Amino acid sequence: MRVRPVSVASGVSAMWFDEKNTGASTLAQAQERTLSLSPNTNASSQGIITHSWRARDLLDLQYTAIATVVQPVTFKLYSDNSNYGAPISATPIWLVEPEFDIEFRGISAV
């Protein structure tokens, strides 16, 4: 995921990949995960942030039929005013651009 701040905003945001839960991100999830904290402002020297997820478990790489329900990996962001100093009013802060690198296994060039 390529994430870029789009405004000058206060505070920070927590960002992480979740392999277990596809629900909305919460403070409890943000506090119990290994994540990155990024400033909410485009005036930051960090600029564009890139987050990557790779399959680390062989079960993530096994063949799954189309009709089978799978648990997807979810990219989550969380921020609030009281814990992370984010703006109180609804403000656009991040532009999230997904980028996929797909590898096909078992195909040979003839």
Image (cartoon, rainbow, N blue to C red):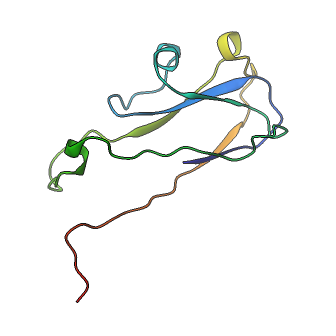
**Quarter of the C terminus within the rendering:** bottom left
Residue 86 position by quadrant = top right
Provide residue 52's location: percent of width, then percent of height: 49, 46
In the image, residue 109 sits, relative to residue 4, either above or below, namely below
Q: In the image shown, does 80 or 61 lie closer to the viewer?
A: 61
As drawn, 57 above or below 102: above
Question: Would you place residue 7 above or below residue 23 in this image?
Answer: below
For the view shown, which residue lies furthest in the bottom direction? 110
x, y percent for residue 104: 28, 67
Residue at the image point whose x is 71% and y is 36% from the top: 93
In the picture, measured across the screen, residue 65 lies left or right of residue 77, that is: left
Measuring 75% from the left and 44% from the top, which residue is drawn there? 47
Q: Position of residue 48 (x, y in %)?
A: 70, 47
Please tell me which residue lies in front, 57 or 76.
Answer: 57
Asked if residue 99 lies left or right of residue 74, the reply is right
Q: Position of residue 65 (x, y in %)?
A: 14, 55
Up-down relation of residue 78 to residue 105 (above or below):
above
Residue drawn at x 74%, y 31% is 40
